[in-house]
Image: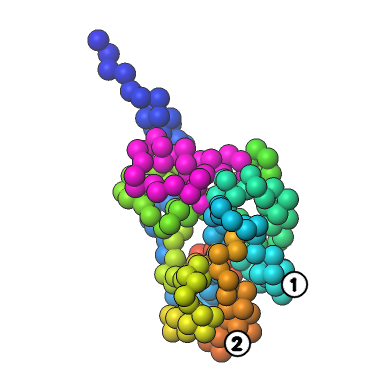
């Protein structure tokens, strides 16, 4: 009697074969920063679902748009469903980049490979089918992952993006000065910083303004999207 493989395994093997046929940078690793030879720094914002509030930090977004600050957003599927108009707007801004952040913001290490795959693919499908956007960047909910997560993300042909500076902006006990201080001490060429743009960061807009008008210029750092940062090879003159 022939042994039957689970459907998810056949699908995973098929995706692996496709991904191996088309090499893509960074698929084999968890990326936490860009090249140190580049004076760029990536401002990234997670858009997780929230139980209370609008789930959209409009003052922050308005500031980023008005000052044309390159930024990368990681959207969960549940967030996209409740913010279709905002999603469409962000996708239309040339100096913004949109990646994904899981379907319902689940704890991936607690799931099977099949469950992780569906959690990861949810917003990827949604952006492709409803917004004609091919998302290539993925950040795990809560920043949590295990070896299985890395394998699934690699098989799906996505780039696994984490960070090397955690702003701590959702923490209500941190002041803007405290957040700014911890970022200022760690910011360097190639850094990737994680913030939130769903309203959980009460100080985020103020911190971003200080960073972009004072800290980054003083350190010679230029905000870039994650993809531009990863593709930046040399220090500009």
Looking at the image, the residue that sits furthest to the bottom is 218
Colour scheme used in the picture? Answer: rainbow
Do the residues under discs 1 and 2 have CB atoms within 8 angstroms?
A: no
- Can residue 72 be seen from the camera position used here? no
Residue at 44% in and 84% down: 185
Q: Position of residue 52 (x, y in %)?
A: 59, 56
Q: Is residue 24 above or below residue 201?
A: above
Quadrant location of the C terminus in the rendered image: bottom right
Quadrant location of the N terminus in the rendered image: top left
Q: Is residue 73 magenta?
A: no
Residue at 62% in and 58% down: 53
- Can residue 87 be seen from the camera position used here? yes
Q: Position of residue 165 (x, y in %)?
A: 44, 72
Indicate which disc residue 57 carries.
none
* Dot 1 alpha-carbon crowd within 10 angstroms: few under 14, some 14 to 19, many 20 or more: few
* Dot 2 alpha-carbon crowd within 10 angstroms: few under 14, some 14 to 19, many 20 or more: few
Residue bearing mark 1? 66
Segment colored magenta: 101-127
Name the dominant secondary structure of the magenta segment. helix
Earlier-in-chain disc, 1 versus 2: 1
Residue bearing mark 2? 214
Helix, strand, or loop for circle 2?
Answer: helix
Helix, strand, or loop for circle 1?
Answer: helix
Q: Is residue 126 magenta?
A: yes
Q: Position of residue 83 (x, y in %)?
A: 67, 50
């Amino acid at each position: 009697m022939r042994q039957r493989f689970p459907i998810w395994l056949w699908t995973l093997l098929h995706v692996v074969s496709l991904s191996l046929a088309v090499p893509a940078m960074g698929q084999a690793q968890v990326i936490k920063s860009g090249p140190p030879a580049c004076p760029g720094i990536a401002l990234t914002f997670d858009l997780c679902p929230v139980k209370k509030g609008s789930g959209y930090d409009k003052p922050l977004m308005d500031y980023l748009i008005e000052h044309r600050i390159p930024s990368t957003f990681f959207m969960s599927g549940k967030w996209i469903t409740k913010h279709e108009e905002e999603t469409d707007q962000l996708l239309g801004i040339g100096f913004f980049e949109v990646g994904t952040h899981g379907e319902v913001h689940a704890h991936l290490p607690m799931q099977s490979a099949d469950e992780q795959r569906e959690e990861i693919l949810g917003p990827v499908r949604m952006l492709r089918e409803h917004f004609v956007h091919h998302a290539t960047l993925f950040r795990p909910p809560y920043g949590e992952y295990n070896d299985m997560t890395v394998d699934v993300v690699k098989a799906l042909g996505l780039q696994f993006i984490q960070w090397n500076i955690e702003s701590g902006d959702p923490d209500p006990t941190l002041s803007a000065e405290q957040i700014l201080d911890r970022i200022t001490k760690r910011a360097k060429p190639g850094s990737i910083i994680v913030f939130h743009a769903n309203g959980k960061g009460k100080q985020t807009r103020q911190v971003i303004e200080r960073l972009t008008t004072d800290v980054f210029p003083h350190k010679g750092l230029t905000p870039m999207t994650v993809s531009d940062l990863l593709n930046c090879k040399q220090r500009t003159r």
